[in-house]
């Protein structure tokens, strides 16, 4: 009789224990599903673009912490001064020499205050101007993965100050997303029109798309020199059409070009961002 009672106790349903076990099982299933989703997302997301390029030496924006610390320690002074060789770099539009570039940039101290009434619009490279603490947040509308289409969609968000000068740098992500140069320039022209309608007195500058390293081209052939030059030629023509200024910032890369790239071969270092602003100072004085 006692053994029968014991057997009945063993098979007796226990709601609390069942609820606890079910909860644990559901949590395990959710963890597995979440891990599977992340693995799938990682496979289908491009990992060599301006929007997503992140190496073990870089943070989520694509810029290395080492590069940021180097700029901070040197108080905006450049390390490894460039050699004075009269080496040329041709971007398909203009030819520059190191000597010419040195006269216009290297000897000019960076004056952050000159850009108080300027606004920079672009992708993660523009975001670097704030990340490296070269400009205030209000002067930078740079967002990882930004394209011309995204800028148009968020026009009211990016025009956050009544700027006198607007510097636009977009195109790297558009190229990777296989947009044609004609469609790109059409959308770019619409973006310029939208800016003019909202800030009619602002001076607008279109900046050239920067080239990438051979390593980056191997991962993404659309970043070839010929293709980037094609887009830049279209941008230069667009600037003439819209009566705005085209700036060829590729000239900055004549100085120790190999040292100005982050490990992904697409993003550019703090040193480049410093030189970039020095290059632009003459347009805001």
Image: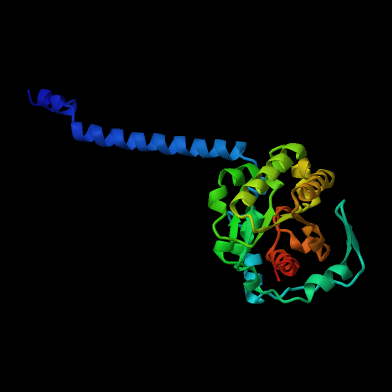
- x and y percentages locating residue 253 in the rendered image: 80, 61
Give the color scheme: rainbow, by chain, secondary structure or one colour: rainbow
Depth check: give the residue in front, 152 or 256: 152
**Residue 49 visible in the current orientation:** no
- x and y percentages locating residue 164 in the rendered image: 64, 62
> How many numbered marks does the figure carry?
0
In the shown orientation, is residue 226 left or right of residue 42? right
- x and y percentages locating residue 40 in the rendered image: 56, 35
Q: Is residue 239 above or below residue 76?
A: above
User: Who's the residue at 79% across and 57% down the image?
Assistant: 248
Depth check: give the residue in front, 126 or 237: 237
In the shown orientation, is residue 197 left or right of residue 7? right
Task: Choose top left, top right, bottom left or bottom right for residue 226.
Answer: top right
Q: Residue furthest right?
A: 86
Task: Choose top left, top right, bottom left or bottom right for residue 165.
Answer: bottom right
Q: Is residue 84 above or below residue 96?
A: below
User: Who's the residue at 57% across and 48% down the image?
Assistant: 155
Q: Is residue 34 above or below residue 97?
A: above
Q: Quadrant of the N terminus?
A: top left
Depth check: give the residue in front, 279 or 261: 279
């Amino acid at each position: 009789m006692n053994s029968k009672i014991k057997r009945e106790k063993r098979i007796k349903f226990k709601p609390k224990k069942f609820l606890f076990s079910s909860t644990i099982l559901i949590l395990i299933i959710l963890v597995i599903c979440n891990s599977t989703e992340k693995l799938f997302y990682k496979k289908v997301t491009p990992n060599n673009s301006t929007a997503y390029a992140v190496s073990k030496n870089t943070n989520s924006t694509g810029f290395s912490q080492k590069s940021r610390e180097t700029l901070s320690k040197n108080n905006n002074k450049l390390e490894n001064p460039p050699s004075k060789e009269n080496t040329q770099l041709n971007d398909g539009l203009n030819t520059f020499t190191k000597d010419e570039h040195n006269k216009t940039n290297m000897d000019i101290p960076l004056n952050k205050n000159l850009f108080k009434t300027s606004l920079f619009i672009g992708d993660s490279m523009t975001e670097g101007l704030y990340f490296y603490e070269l400009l205030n947040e209000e002067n930078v509308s740079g967002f990882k993965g930004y394209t011309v289409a995204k800028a148009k969609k968020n026009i009211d968000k990016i025009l956050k100050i009544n700027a006198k000068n607007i510097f636009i740098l977009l195109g790297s992500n558009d190229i990777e997303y296989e947009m044609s140069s004609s469609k790109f320039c059409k959308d770019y022209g619409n973006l310029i029109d939208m800016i003019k309608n909202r800030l009619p007195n602002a001076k607008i500058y279109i900046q050239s798309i920067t080239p990438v390293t051979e390593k980056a081209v191997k991962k993404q052939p659309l970043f070839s020199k010929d293709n980037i030059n094609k887009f830049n030629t279209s941008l230069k023509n667009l600037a003439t059409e819209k009566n705005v200024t085209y700036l060829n910032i590729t000239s900055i890369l004549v100085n120790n070009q190999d040292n100005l790239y982050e490990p992904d071969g697409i993003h550019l270092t703090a040193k480049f961002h410093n030189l970039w602003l020095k290059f632009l100072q003459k347009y805001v004085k």
